Image (spheres, rainbow, N blue to C red):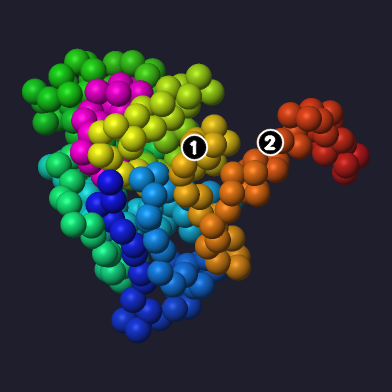
Amino acid sequence: MRYIESVQIMRKDIPNEDIYPFNIESLKHMQNLDFDHDITLFSGENGSGKSTLIEAIATAYGFNPEGGNKNIQFSTRNTHSDLYEYIRMNRGIHHAEDGFFLRAESFYNMASKIDEIGGIHQYYGGKSLHSVSHGESFLNLVLNRFWGNGLYILDEPEAALSPTGQFTLLKKIYDLANQENSQFIIATHSPILLACPHAKIYEFDEEGIHEKSYRDTMNFALYHRFLNDPAMIQRILEEDE
């Protein structure tokens, strides 16, 4: 199920392409970006623009820039870019009944807002997200609050999770997409999440945004090299000695 089918940056309306975020190399080359899979993954180095675009898509759709569903609106600090104002979004014919924007960067602030609202902890595992470990709170939210028939936009959700937790997250994502009419757009560094079957992967770099197979991504290549040759770490650390 695709609730967002594609997005474009309206370049003719941009006042100055030499300032952030319009000067990010990957976004400077971006034309139309299709979301023709139920799960779309953004991969790339820090600063490559994947989280900036994720944030803009979520905000343009109506989510709070700091995370949450459309009913959770708060602002701890206004740090999101104005890229969302220049996004043209082509929506699917179906309306999402549920949705959530989960971003690791501001998860603490969102959890505090849920405590402040009160009376809704039953939707998040029955307890404050602050009362369990960081990783447990992430999983409590996803396992209990992602109800299906929805659009879920996740920014580096692996940040608080162990490898086992990442597998649990991946299973939930896969089941919601394949059995519960849900769409996911995810920015991630995780080689576990990037391995999701039947997902589309876009890799961000200085030359633009490119569709890649899992084994052709930079993250897979690096992890594969390390796992096959752990001694490379010692060689790298000793290079400047």
Magenta residue span:
137-152
Name the quadrant of the C terminus. Answer: top right
Label 2 is placed on what type of residue?
Answer: Tyr
Q: Mark 1: few, some, or many residues within 10 Å (few <14, many ≥20)?
A: few
Q: Nearer the viewer, residue 21 or 171?
A: 171
* Residue 65 seen in this snapshot: no
Q: Say above or below: 175 vs 68.
A: above
Q: Say above or below: 232 vs 168.
A: below
Image point (21%, 38%), residue name: 149
Q: Say above or below: 217 vs 140.
A: below
Image point (27%, 64%), residue name: 89
Check disc 1 and report the residue beneath it.
197
| Left or right for 79, reference 208 | left
Task: Identify the element where label 2 is drawn.
Answer: helix
Check disc 2 and report the residue beneath it.
223
What is the quadrant of residue 106 in the picture?
top left
Q: Nearer the viewer, residue 126 or 34?
A: 34
Task: Measure the C-alpha gap from mark 1 to mark 2.
Answer: 18 Å
Q: Is residue 241 magenta?
A: no
Label 1 is placed on what type of residue?
Answer: Pro
Q: Is residue 145 magenta?
A: yes
Q: Say above or below: 81 vs 120.
A: below
Q: Nearer the viewer, residue 50 or 89?
A: 89
